[in-house]
Image: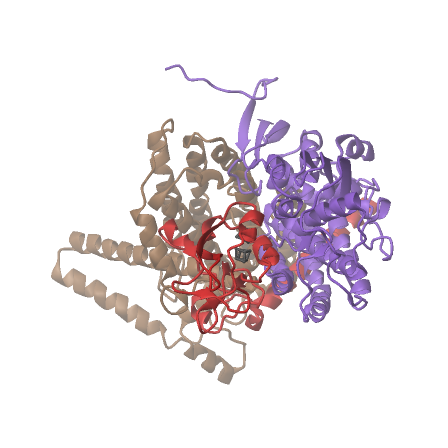
Chain colours: A brown, B purple, C red
Amino acid sequence: MTSNIYDNFVASLTQSIHEWLYHVMPPTWALISEMTIIGLVFLLFYALVGLFLVYAERKVCAFMQNRVGPNRVGPYGIFQTIADFIKLLMKELITIKNSDKLLFNIAPFIVIIASFMAIAAIPFAKGLHAIDFDIGILYVIAVSSLGVVGILLAGWSSNNKYSLIGAMRSGAQIISYELSVGMSLLTIIILAGTMQFSEIVQGQEYGWFLFKGHIPAFIAFVVFLIASTAETNRGPFDLAEAESELTAGFHTEYSGIKFAFFFLAEYMNMFIVASIGATVFLGGWMPFMVHGWDGFNTVMNYIPPSIWYILKTGFIIWLMMWFKWTFPRLRIDQLLTLEWKYLLPINLFNILLMAFIVLMGWHF
Amino acid sequence: MKEVIHTPVPLVEEEEYHINMGPQHPSTHGVLRLVVTLQGEIVKSLKPHCGYIHRGIEKMCEKDTYPQIIHLTDRIDYLSAHINNHAVCLLVEKALEIEVPERVKYVRTIMDELARIQSHQLWWASFGMDLGGLTCFFYGLRDREKILDIWEETTGARFLQSYYTPGGLLWDIHPNFQKDVKAFIKYFRKKIRDYDNILSGNVIFRERSRNIGLMSKEDAISWGVTGPSGRGSGWSCDVRKHHPYALYDKVDFKEILYTEGDTLARYLVRMDEMRESMNIIEQLIDNIPEGDFTAKMKAVIKLPAGEYYQRVESARGDLGLYCISDGNKTPYRMKFRTPSFSNLSVLDHISRDLKIADLVAIGGSLDLVIPDIDR
Amino acid sequence: MKEFFKYFADIFTGVRSLLIGMSVTGKYFFSPGQIVTQQYPENRKTLKMYDRFKGEVIMPHDENNHHRCTGCAICELNCPNGSIEVISARIDGPDGKKVRIIDQHIYHLGMCTFCSLCVKTCPENALAFGQEFEHAVFDRTVLTKILNQPGSSILKEIA
Ligand code: SF4
Ligand code: SF4
């Protein structure tokens, strides 16, 4: 196994912080402060990534539409989203007269907590993740689908018919597409033989699973892209929002920072599924290496793993944006037809195919 | 105080509820209010409420002289301003039995067809947006901009041109006009392929529009659905063919007819009409004869007492102008038969038992312009 | 069996149409040269409106502060919404007779619908359209303009 030159750096950094903390305080306190530090780091990361993705989306869609996009606040408009965020912070939080106050206020937090929890298991580089579960994939799938509870609550408690329709659509949608996301990942789990993210990444050292598993892996990748776009409620599957039909769907009645939470969560969910896709199919932080090409591999190794990770995730996010800004929205019955009539049978067959290929050893 | 709940449509069954689409709703493109009765997501019935943008244009016409009426007609259906102007001009010319110069007819026909293309471009843009394809909106507006520029150069205005006057044109076409129009046709023939690639061929779009909002030919005739919406049901109702005005009896063009009567057919009619309009313009643009840009008119125009009716084919359908004159310089009564009004009336009939998303698609495919409904 | 093939044919044609759609947006994404947005406040210097652009109604004055308006009020008569008020005055003409001249040619830009009737019907061609289009103001009295400049007088040839 070729060791990456950046591996030691991350490991020694975390190790030294860890040792220093245990040196200066008792173990309980050290543990608590470690957790707090990690939490804060993730919080900051969350906000930054969210803000950046909003900006990126606006730029990407602008270019696809022959426009310039935000360009007034700061150079190339990079501070636009920060300005928007400040505006949202200062806006009035409107309380709806006949709404269910408790649920109405809780809903945005459920959505945001669900996406926040999912980040924990994602490996950003070797050793750079909060927890390395041995059932990492299962955990992420489970946690990321919690968000729909928040959406349902939001739609229900707003006491608005548009919101309710949006929420119900979202419920039907996530329940169906959750299946496809899980199954397409299952295909790769068969190939990888593990559910632990760190091992999945290690297994892709010489060839990402997308190439290793060739045909079934490719089908799984496509299905994953479609299903995860649907799971994040993004266009062309943005039926829960469907601004031309339901004005704003489930978050019609939300304003100010509570709306911002929904908004941020949408982008973070996109980031999370893109990370999972990048980790499982495209090798996560693993550089692009080919067995036997030592010179090439060394060059690739010089690029830090986090950069690899960001590039791959960015690519998938860009793909999802490309979908959103090209396709018209599906109707609810077509959405379900697509899942139950096309994606699911294909997926089941695909799993069989993958199992067969793994059995016969026909993968690379 | 006891709250009064106003239910405009009685609920007939259990589990039904109303939803107010509009007057501020993204898909009604203006201040149209549809009270929709839903069962779950299924549209059971709907009732349009008009009048939010009623400006009393018909009444205002009664105090205005005929040249002044022109600028009001711009504002009825602002997307086919030229064509509305044309209706008034034709009416006055018919009443006074004035023969307008050949050049005027050429320019008017070209301008009308540009207006039709422009209107259909905007319709395509917003129809795409209704269906959730936001990018369509920008492509449509991008190409429409070119026509607006051409207009701005010749007429001085981009949107509400008031370019026609009874007897002719306000001023002559700009020297660059022919060149620009030809450049535009060349440009748009290329860009319209993008339209097809991004929307017409798209499987999601096809599935969402096929067999949705079926309107039979009988329906179209009995509800008076004219224009591209009526022709999508196979009703040959093109005023340009049946009652030709300007140069439409001279140019060679097809009346686009589709017989399916669904949303897709209405969509395809408009797409083909854009191409057909380009053909018409291409036939005319090089042959604009020299001559006056207006006929000799009296300073004060008075129509002989009597009743007059003039039809034109606006981008939305059959626009009728009914005028009673008592011999004064202002009409005694002016009535507009606007196409969007009757096109809206069929919406309830064709969208029953479909989903909300379909309602939005059907509404888009009827191409309603709200000021055209309310006047 | 036929259904079976149709199932796959549907998938194939569907995916193909989606890819065609994506190629359009993808093409524009990678050709930033096709961006059509105008950078408005920045291009103010170079922005040139078309000659005929109807920005506002103006009364052109020559270098000696002469205009062509006789104060006949035909424009006022023709304006469909009363955007023009002509206030004329009578002064002693050179040959002792009273002559009508324009005192104030008041133009309410806020009410004007740019129908061009005033410009078109003015017998002396005293009016024209100006290219100015930045008319946003905080106080709408600013939009009421007096078109004849102070101290101006009518061109000798017309009077
Ligand atoms: S501007 Fe022309 S029409 Fe108006 S008062 Fe002066 S001369 Fe008469
Ligand atoms: S352009 Fe028309 S509305 Fe404006 S001042 Fe002249 S006549 Fe009146």
**With B202 as the anchor, is B55 left or right in this view?**
left
Q: Which residue shows up at 45% across the image and 39% down it?
A: A252
A43 relative to B216, above or below: below
A282 relative to B302, above or below: below
Quadrant of the rendered image holding ligand 1: bottom right
Q: Position of residue A69 (x, y in %)?
A: 47, 63
> Which is more toward the observer, B118 or A89?
B118
As drawn, the residue found furthest toward the bottom would be A295
**With C29 as the anchor, is B353 left or right in this view?**
right
Q: Is residue B219 visible?
A: yes
Q: Is residue A220 visible?
A: no
Q: Which residue shows up at 71% across the image and 62% down it?
A: B193
> Which is more toward the observer, A108 or B85?
B85
> Which is more toward the observer, A344 or B277?
B277
**With C88 as the anchor, is A323 left or right in this view?**
right
Numbered label tally = 0
**With B186 as the anchor, is B47 left or right in this view?**
left
B84 relative to C100, above or below: above
As drawn, the residue found furthest toward the front would be C96
Q: Position of residue B192 (x, y in %)?
A: 71, 61
User: Based on the displayed image, in which of its 4 quarters is residue A271 positioned?
Assistant: bottom left
Q: Position of residue B294 (x, y in %)?
A: 73, 58
User: Based on the displayed image, in which of its 4 quarters is residue B88 positioned?
Assistant: top right
Q: Which residue shows up at 48% across the image and 58% down it?
A: C97
Q: Position of residue A47 (x, y in %)?
A: 34, 56
